[in-house]
């Protein structure tokens, strides 16, 4: 089920989205792509934070 919704944006934001959009790509496809990229960045950041936390908690073998 699809429903068209309006998302109010400034003219500057509309221009930036237009510049990012590939020929033939819909704004819906572009926004899906941007959302997916953001989710990936957030996930990468969480993994990096976990790796950093693990490093701080681990003891080097030379210290054992």
Image (cartoon, rainbow, N blue to C red):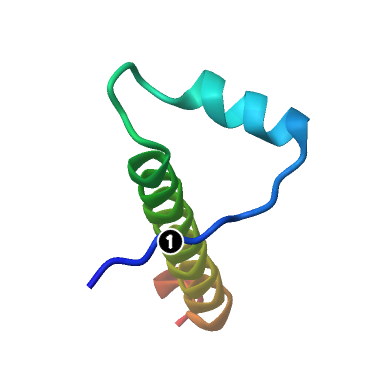
Q: Which residue is mark 1?
A: 39
Instruction: Tell me where residue 4 appears, x and y as whole percent.
Output: 41, 59
Residue at 32% of width from left, 16% of height from top?
23
Comparing 61 with 42, the one in front is 42
| Residue 45 sits above or below residue 1 on the image | above
| Crowd class of label 1 (few under 14; some 14 to 19; many from 20; radius 10 Å) | few
| Residue 18, quarter of the rendered image | top right
Q: Is residue 29 left or right of residue 18?
A: left
Residue at 48% of width from left, 74% of height from top?
50
Q: In the picture, which quadrant includes the N terminus?
A: bottom left
| Residue 18 sits above or below residue 46 on the image | above
Residue at 43% of width from left, 67% of height from top?
47
Q: Is residue 43 left or right of residue 45?
A: left
Query: Element at badge 1?
Result: helix
Residue at 28% of width from left, 22% of height from top?
24
Residue with the most extreme left position: 1
Instruction: Tell me where residue 63 appears, x and y as whole percent.
Output: 51, 76
Q: In the picture, which quadrant includes the C terminus?
A: bottom left
Q: Is residue 28 left or right of residue 45?
A: left
Instruction: Tell me where residue 41 appears, x and y as whole percent.
Output: 47, 54
């Amino acid at each position: 089920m699809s429903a068209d919704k309006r998302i109010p944006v400034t003219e500057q934001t509309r221009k930036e989205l237009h510049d990012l959009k590939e020929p033939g790509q819909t704004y819906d496809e572009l926004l899906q792509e941007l959302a997916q990229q953001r989710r990936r960045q957030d996930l990468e950041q969480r993994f990096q934070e976990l790796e950093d936390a693990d490093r701080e908690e681990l003891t080097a073998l030379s210290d054992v």
